[in-house]
Amino acid sequence: MKAIVALVLLVLVVVIYGFQRTPPTPKSSPFSEQRAEADLRTIVGFGPRPAGSEALAKARNYIVAELSKAGLKPELDEFDARTPRGFRHMVNIRAVRPGGRPTTIAVTGHYDTKVFDRFSFTGANDGGSSAAWLLEFARATAGLKLQNTLEFVFFDGEEAVVEWTDDDSVYGSRHDVDRRYRDRKLNDLKALILVDMIGDKSLNIRKEAQSTSWLKNLIWDTARSMGYSKEFPDEQIEVSDDHVPYLRAAIPAADLIDFEYPCWHEACDTLDKVSANSLKIVGDVVYSSLPEIDRRVSQSASR
């Protein structure tokens, strides 16, 4: 009887302790929300930044200068895209952290904004947050030792010039896939992470349905282990975005996008709607995911 009572008490203690435990303490990374916020303010300060505009050229010059300050050697990948309104000059920005292998993990986002005739669209979250986040993430990974090469790509021309179709959208990512194929380097790309609209104060990044299962599950498992289940729920959503051209080329890709954003493609997509803390959360999660992504890519490449 005493043994049974003792066992019951032990179970109660375990249950009570389990309910009283504090949530997991989020791990941190070198990603600085202060620097990311400063980058965001600067980029958005250039005004609406559609492909081919002077404002986007200013944003591009800023990004290139900051990448150079971080010890990277940014490259401009220029191309002329056929759009419903004629050819438009576009420019992707690329920077590389060489690893011990030529096989590559790419972290990407777009830096252009959509053009609207009826209002001025500065795209603080849609176009601004991904550009500022990717710039700071490139800085933050300076001390990260990976076996594979790490590449950062800022896409031009993600937004439709007129209306979203397969031919009028994601110009930069489609061009990047074509370039890698022409250069016979497409097979070197083993995983791609895309961020888009990740600055919402009420961050809610659902699993993108088309994204590669092992890659998105790894990122969501990392987020959960860091205490960010609320920001990275298990619900799914399907979004057409810059990751799709890579999926079509059989490249594993995952899209991190918060599509529950009331100011999407509206004049209210302004700086006051964006949280630097949300950028930091995504930065910490992706940074913490990279070592395991790197391990799996290396393991796969060795087979």
Image (cartoon, grey):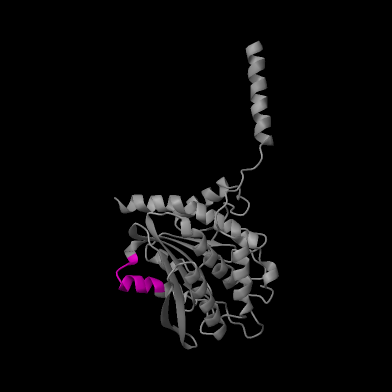
Q: Position of residue 66 (x, y in %)?
A: 52, 71
Q: Residue at x 38, y 71 (%)?
A: 177
Image quadrant in which you'd find residue 180: bottom left
> Residues in magenta?
176-186
From where the camera sits, is residue 91 visible?
yes
Quadrant location of the N terminus in the rendered image: top right
Mainly helix, strand or loop, the magenta region?
A: helix
Along the line of sight, the residue nearer the viewer: 231 or 136: 136
From where the camera sits, is residue 122 visible?
no
Q: Position of residue 206 (x, y in %)?
A: 57, 57
Q: Residue at x 40, y 72 (%)?
A: 176
Image quadrant in which you'd find residue 29: bottom right
Q: Position of residue 164 (x, y in %)?
A: 52, 76
Q: Residue at x 51, y 55 (%)?
A: 287
Image quadrant in which you'd find residue 56: bottom right
Q: Vertical placement of 272 versus 3: above or below?
A: below
Q: Residue at x 51, y 77 (%)?
A: 60
In the image, farthest residue toward the top:
1
Along the line of sight, the residue nearer the viewer: 285 or 208: 285
Along the line of sight, the residue nearer the viewer: 117 or 269: 269
Magenta highlight on residue 67: no
